Image (tube, rainbow, N blue to C red):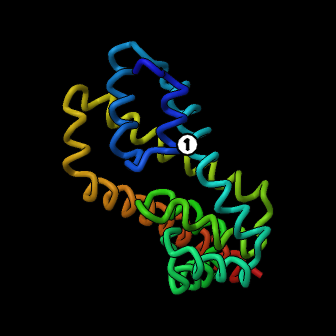
Amino acid sequence: MQLGYLGIIALMVFSPFPPELFIPLAGFWVAQGHLDPIGVVAAALCGFLLSILPWYCAGRFLGEKRLQKLLQRHRWLAVPNQDLNKGKHWFRRHGGKAVLICLFVPGSRNLIALPAGLSGMPPVTFLAYTTVGGILWLSGLLTLGYFLGDRYQLVQQHYDSLSSLIFIAVVVVLAICAIGYYWQRRGSFTRR
């Protein structure tokens, strides 16, 4: 808490720990009156964007061939070629929805930026999807920490199951939206 909002930005950019572990703690500090919730979400979002944009730019400006050579040469980047190909294929099928969905799946947040850049998704579109998804994701974690109070360590203990529940909730909401869209489109064709 001593570093406040700058500390949150630094944790989002440089921490090896996932935000699911420290954003709920910030929610606890918000509940105690030490931090402002909008400030926490803004700082976390700023740090998140700073951490994800280099991946997007690598995909966008290096191109697929140079990126694959770089990944083969520098295995410490921890992105196998087959994962890059899977991500690219999945991104082509789902587009912007892929960015939104992957923000709720640990381990895929930064990786979805590579196929987004490779596919030529415009930067403004990528930032829009990332910002909307990031605000939802970070606000959810902050709210969880706020209501859990000093029991925020429960989040740390049940991190994987919570991430899975959030992912399932997002998929259900997207499925409901897709069904509604389909029914609306189907209804407009039958009226003609």
Eyeballing the image, is 122 above or below 115?
A: above
Check the picture and name the quadrant holding the C terminus. bottom right
Q: Position of residue 8 (x, y in %)?
A: 49, 32
Eyeballing the image, is 74 above or below 151?
A: below
- Please give the name of the residue rendered at 51% of the width and 75% of the height, measured from the top-left corner: 75
Give, as a three-letter code, the residue at label 1.
Answer: Ile
- Number of marks present in the image shown: 1
Q: Position of residue 136 (x, y in %)?
A: 51, 45
- Residue 170: image quadrant is bottom left
- Please give the name of the residue rendered at 49% of the width and 29% of the height, measured from the top-left corner: 7
Residue under label 1, please give it.
135
Check the picture and name the quadrant holding the N terminus. top left
Eyeballing the image, is 172 above or below 129?
A: below
Horizontal arrangement in the rendering, residue 48 relative to residue 138 (left or right): right
- Please give the name of the residue rendered at 55% of the width and 47% of the height, measured from the top-left corner: 134
- Please give the name of the residue rendered at 51% of the width and 57% of the height, measured from the top-left corner: 103
- Residue 116: image quadrant is bottom right
Front residue (pair 50, 36): 50
